[in-house]
Amino acid sequence: MTFDQIMQVALSGLLMGLIYALVAAGLSLIFGLMDVVNFAHGELMMVAMYAAFTLWQVSGLDPMIMLPLVALLMFGLGMAVYRLLIARALAVRFNKGMVQIFVTFGLAIFIRGAAQMVFGGEFRAVTGTVLADRSWHLGGIFLPLPQLAAGFVCLLAFGALFLIGRTEFGRALEATREDRDAVALIGIDRDRIFSLGWGLGAATLGVAGVMLAGFYYVSPNVGANFALIAYVTVALGGFGSLMGALVAGLLIGEVEAVTAQLLEPSLKQVGMFAIYLAVLMFRPRGLFGKI
Amino acid sequence: MQNAITLRRRRELITAAILLVLLIVLPLPFHDPYTRNLMILTLLYAALAQSWNILGGTCGQISLGHSLYFGVGAYVSTLLFVWHGVPPWFGMLAAAAVAGLLALLVGWPCFRLSGHYYAIATVVVQEIAYLLFLNWDYIGGASGVYVPFHGQSWMNLQFRTAKLPYFYVMLGFFALTWIAAWLIEGSRWGFSWRAVKDDVIAARSLGVRVFPSKMAAAAISGGLTGVGGAIFAQFVGYIDPDSILSGPLSILIALPAVLGGVGTLWGPLLGAVVLIPLRELSSTFLGSSGSGVDLMLYGALIMVVALMRPQGLVSLFQRGRNGSAS
């Protein structure tokens, strides 16, 4: 294997890892805030991808221009999901954990059905954008521009998430995460924070979904695979840790790229799953998880 | 107090006996294969959910990867039948043994994790197995294994067109899982496992051995699920990783118990009776056009039941008897 080939694998893994990390960040944010694992996470991302696709089809504009709009729509959708379903699931008195798992799971199936109804089952793709089919050659290394742009935007989104953590709202998020009952005493409306948290989690999916739509086919089942990787990423990085999601996402992207080289491509996920299990044996709380 | 418990348990047994008689005659008036098929599937998922419930409900360890045991059970029994002509009845025993051992093997590392970490680890283990089976050409890989027809016989559990024998085999399987759950509920194990579910630290302080409790629950739960896989393989005559070792199947194994009532004796059956016909009928009558309406209906049902009846549908029948089954 030449140096160029090694760099090629490493950079491809890095770019995919950034997307995995951002998808995981939204999941981790929601979990950290209220101990709810959103099993409809992949489906929400699928909605963002379809939103990007539809806006592109209707307006003809590059999905990347639509990114703020999609992120805003997803923010609203996330808040709606919280208000309509999650708030009710949190108020349940029996089998809380079970109800949360299966409510979000029911939502996932519902969204998949709705996508099937509106768009049909076939694969769709955004084509003819400014970046499409172009790539950047660096010596023997070949980097498709849509992936490069996606990685860059994901990195920016991570920066934004870290900055949000420093604002008044971010501190309220952190306080609610630390003790969700005590915050009421200092005048923080917990319900509002939860709903904004869901909005923010879904908006990060909006960013990831739009960028992914630039080079990945959209179908009603596209979410399932990304969601599974997101769960693994979040558990590996530690639930609720933004830094954990970033590091674990990059690690998983790299492991996937390397496994795809060493084993058959159809087995590329075995590597990341094995790493995840191995790490969890030594650190059951994940790399950056709080005990 | 002891007396009240004994009385309740005796009443449960009598209810079960009456129900068994009713279920034995139930398929007789229905002659069309579709209805009988529906009944068989309902019993299958009721039994699988009952097996899942032993680990997920009684012991509180939410496994979202139970199709692993179902799939491995199906492969063990089918390959023994195809390669060596071993009758599926022995195949079932082998399936139970292998699936039970596998559950111990999975549990040994995974029970160090708790809550969501455990649930996700079970998904991952099952996904790894799915990918490996998909690429393992020696046992059929992605193209799966056909069960050859060796002539109509009870010994081989193969029948040309008759559905009724499978119905009774499934009924027997469901009865087996119910009796296992009933026995566990009243035994020392049942008390320990429920203690582990409610509060691990309190259970440990009372001398409950937490890790062995989880392992025992996992082995019994996994073993019974493996038996289901073995029967299912003979019933459908064809297995591949997508149909018997997939993520959605894992959820479908757990769902009837969750909808019916987690940790209850009758929840899995009740949940399956509601869920499986609805799912099958909606996919037959609404899903054939690929419109997705069936999925929307299925998803909405899960959301509504989980939110409206968090203690499960079984609570509809339990007014006045509080906490009798938890």
Image (tube, coloured by chain):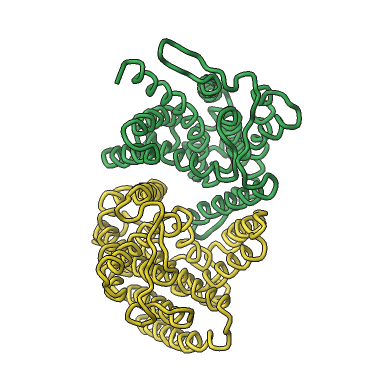
Chain colours: A green, B yellow
Residue B291, above or below A13: below
Image position of A166 (left or right of B228): right
- Give x and y (percent) for residue A62: 68, 23
Q: Quadrant of residue A237?
A: top left
Indicate the quadrant containing the N terminus of chain B: top left, top right, bottom left or bottom right.
bottom left
Judged left or right of residue B250, residue B75 is left
Residue toward you, A122 or B320: A122
Q: Position of residue B81 (x, y in %)?
A: 30, 69
Q: Is residue A199 above or below residue B20?
A: above
Q: Residue furthest right?
A: A59
Can residue B63 be seen at all in this image of the molecule? no
| Res A131 quadrant in image | top right
Task: Check the image and name the residue furthest to the top.
Answer: A139
Give x and y (percent) for residue A77. 66, 40
Q: Is residue B142 above or below residue A229?
A: below
- Quadrant of the image containing the C terminus of chain B: bottom left
From the viewer's perspective, is residue B220 above or below residue B31?
above
The residue sitting at 65% across, 24% down in the picture is A128
Question: How many dots with numbers?
Answer: 0
Left or right: A13 with respect to B275?
left
Q: Is residue A265 visible?
A: yes
Q: Residue at x 31, y 67 (%)?
A: B82
Q: Position of residue B193 (x, y in %)?
A: 32, 64
Q: Nearer the viewer, residue A95 or B242?
A: B242
